[in-house]
Image (tube, rainbow, N blue to C red):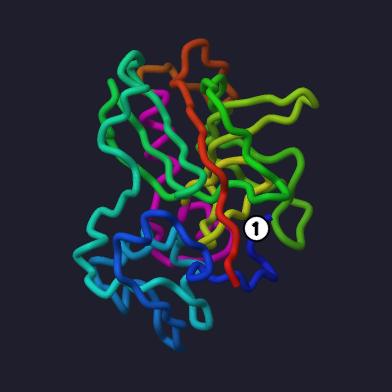
């Protein structure tokens, strides 16, 4: 359940409102090319701009290359201040249109992260929710790793919704292919998981899911099992996931 196997969708074909403010060109990666080789210490910024991780930025894939790399330094399309979060200590804002998530404290952005949400066929619910459960080593009961019977790992999982059919929706670690790819959950990069189950990247560095998880449950006495939270951070999900324009 990587969400991209067999897909040829290009990050270049996904248009975000924030693209309008940054000049970029589409580049197909050639043999031996990757984010680190092309952009050195700035590879994380380009990855954020493309909403992609290193496992998917491989030869044959297209990516958006900023014409002025400094324009995507610590890239975020989210507002630094979110007035809807002032009344609460912590709030998670998810912008489906931009495919980005922000962690706010008293209305001020602490950090933001690229996501992979559900697309049109598996839409992520919109509205206002609250984190009601946390599980650091959660695994899916519905989906498995590609070509295996092993439940798909959903590490650093934060539950924000249960629908009328009893299906739970989580924010959790996964891979980022550069386009909406989940079954409705909100995915954050977890290169540790990818290295363990897919063998790449060799040196996992991106731990976005862990960053959000640790921030969300700060002060909670954690156990190895799923924990019910009585007053987890509020979650506001807005916008519409983009579709390919090719």
- In the image, residue 228 above or below residue 240: above
Measuring from the top left, give residue 21's x and y in whole percent: 30, 60
Residue that appears at 68% across and 50% down: 120
Residue that appears at 45% across and 87% down: 30
- In the image, residue 136 above or below residue 149: above
Q: Is residue 125 left or right of residue 233?
A: right
- Determine which quarter of the picture holds residue 70: bottom left
Which quadrant holds the C terminus? Answer: bottom right
- In the image, residue 214 above or below residue 142: above
> Which type of secondary structure does the marked residue at label 1 adopt?
loop
How many badges with numbers are in the image? 1
Tell which of 154 and 104 is nearer to you: 104
Measuring from the top left, give residue 109's x and y in whole percent: 28, 34
Residue 1 lies in the magenta stretch? no
Q: Is residue 142 left or right of residue 201?
A: right
- In the image, residue 87 above or below residue 190: above
Which segment is the magenta one? 190-217
Q: Which residue is situated farthest in the top direction here?
A: 230
């Amino acid at each position: 359940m990587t969400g991209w196997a067999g897909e040829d969708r290009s990050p270049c074909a996904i248009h975000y409102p924030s693209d309008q403010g940054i000049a970029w060109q589409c580049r197909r990666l050639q043999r031996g090319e990757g984010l680190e080789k092309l952009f050195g210490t700035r590879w994380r910024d380009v990855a954020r701009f493309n909403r992609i991780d290193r496992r998917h930025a491989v030869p044959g894939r297209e990516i958006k290359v900023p014409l002025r790399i400094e324009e995507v330094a610590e890239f975020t399309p989210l507002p630094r201040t979110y007035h809807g979060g002032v009344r609460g200590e912590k709030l998670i804002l998810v912008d489906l249109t931009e495919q980005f998530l922000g962690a706010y404290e008293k209305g001020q952005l602490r950090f933001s992260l690229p996501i992979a949400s559900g697309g049109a066929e598996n839409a992520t619910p919109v509205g206002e929710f609250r984190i009601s459960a946390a599980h650091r080593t959660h695994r899916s009961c519905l989906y498995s790793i590609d070509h295996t019977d092993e439940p798909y790992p959903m590490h650093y999982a934060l539950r924000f919704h249960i629908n009328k059919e009893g299906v739970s929706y989580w924010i959790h670690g996964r891979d980022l292919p550069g386009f909406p790819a989940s079954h409705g959950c909100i995915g954050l990069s977890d290169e540790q998981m990818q290295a363990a189950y897919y063998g790449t990247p060799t040196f996992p560095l991106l731990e976005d899911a862990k960053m959000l998880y640790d921030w969300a449950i700060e002060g909670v006495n954690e156990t190895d099992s799923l924990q019910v939270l009585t007053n987890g951070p509020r979650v506001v999900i807005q916008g519409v996931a983009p579709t390919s324009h090719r």
